[in-house]
Amino acid sequence: MSLLVRNRAMLPSLASSFFTGGSLLPSVFDFDNDLLDFDGGSVLVPNANIVENDSDFEIELAAPGLERKDFNVEVDNGILSITAEKKEEKEEKEANYKRREFSYRSFRRSFTLPENSSVDKIDAKYENGILRLKLPKKEITVSKPAKQIKVA
């Protein structure tokens, strides 16, 4: 059984072509792209590498420039959600001027987990710009068909 990815393109292709196809709306509404640009700000959704091993699933997300505290990982009703949010503010004061800069970055990725994943034992580590999650597998007991016993 493989891990199912809930795609970033949450709208069907018909809706996507509606937003991108006409002269009314610019191509920034292309929901199939990883990068959406609205008024100079950007939202970058990191791609995920997913590997299924004999004993676990491994998910890797490239998210450089963040810290451990910026991530929130949760499981709800079989959906693994990974969110990150980082706010930065810089301020320079000199005799003749004052400059303040703000930046805000965030993303959300969701994955539908297979039945054989053990959500109680998920391990998440962030190092060198990569978030790594290990989802151990659990055995699924298959019920055997009913056996007819003759009464003597």
Image (tube, rainbow, N blue to C red):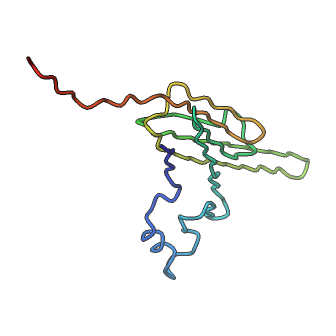
Q: Where the C terminus falls, by quadrant?
A: top left
Q: Is residue 124 above or below residue 63?
A: above
Residue drawn at point x = 66 percent, y = 48 percent? 105
Q: Position of residue 49 (x, y in %)?
A: 64, 48
Q: Residue furthest bottom?
A: 23
Q: Residue furthest right?
A: 95
Q: Residue furthest front?
A: 152
Q: Position of residue 2 (x, y in %)?
A: 50, 45
Q: Position of residue 88 (x, y in %)?
A: 72, 43
Q: Residue furthest left?
A: 152
- Give the camera-side residue of 104 and 129: 129
Q: Is residue 29 above or below residue 107?
A: below
- Give the camera-side residue of 68 and 121: 121
Q: Is residue 39 above or below residue 120?
A: below
Q: Position of residue 98 (x, y in %)?
A: 83, 50
Q: How many marks?
A: 0
Residue drawn at point x = 91 percent, y = 48 percent? 95
Q: Is residue 126 above or below residue 101?
A: above
Residue drawn at point x = 17 percent, y = 27 percent? 148
